[in-house]
Image (cartoon, rainbow, N blue to C red):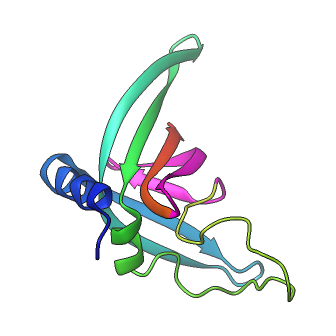
Amino acid sequence: MKNRLAARLERQIRLRGEPVQLIRVVGTSKQSYVRVTVRGVVKTLTTQQLIAGVSQTNYLILLSPDELRRKGWPGAQTATNPPGTVPPNDPVIPTTADKVNFRNAEKAIAQAAAVYDGNVPVRIELRVLG
């Protein structure tokens, strides 16, 4: 049975969201890219001027963890944890090493966090700089 908060969020993202592409670089010497396009709600938080004539906008992007899983994010898992340890995060949560592409521009993820209802992730929040 699907969590009702997650289901409500997915409906809102379908209605109000826009295409957002997550990008992960895999490998060191021979790099490949894992890309997945999902819908996300993008909100502009602030715009700050870095130097004269150059500004940076901060965004909040809301994503559905269920949609990310359905789309196969983050692809094959190459790193493993030593026996007896618990992974620090759910692998579906993007990291600051990943990139996000929306509105025809690639941007850096400054922070990624999941919002839980009990032990079920119902929303992923990305703070994005660009």
Q: Is residue 30 left or right of residue 104?
A: right
- What residue sits 47% from the left and 47% below the top? 125
Q: Give percent across and percent down for residue 99.
A: 54, 56
Q: Which residues are magenta?
A: 96-119
Q: Please, what is the dominant secondary structure of the magenta stretch?
A: strand
Q: Quadrant of residue 101?
A: bottom left
Looking at the image, residue 102 lies above or below residue 31: above
Q: Is residue 85 left or right of residue 40?
A: right
Q: Give percent across and percent down for residue 43.
A: 34, 34
Q: Is residue 124 magenta?
A: no
Which of 9/68 is in front? Answer: 9
Q: Quadrant of the N terminus?
A: bottom left
Q: Is residue 101 magenta?
A: yes
Q: Is residue 42 left or right of residue 17?
A: right
- What residue sits 52% from the left and 70% below the top? 92
Which of 111/85 is in front? Answer: 85
Looking at the image, residue 110 lies above or below residue 4: above
Q: Give percent across and percent down for residue 11.
A: 17, 56
Q: Give percent across and percent down for residue 89.
A: 66, 65
Which of 54/78 is in front? Answer: 78
- What residue sits 32% from the left and 65% below the top? 3
- What residue sits 22% from the left and 50% below the top? 17
Looking at the image, residue 85 lies above or below residue 66: below
Q: Is residue 99 left or right of residue 80?
A: left
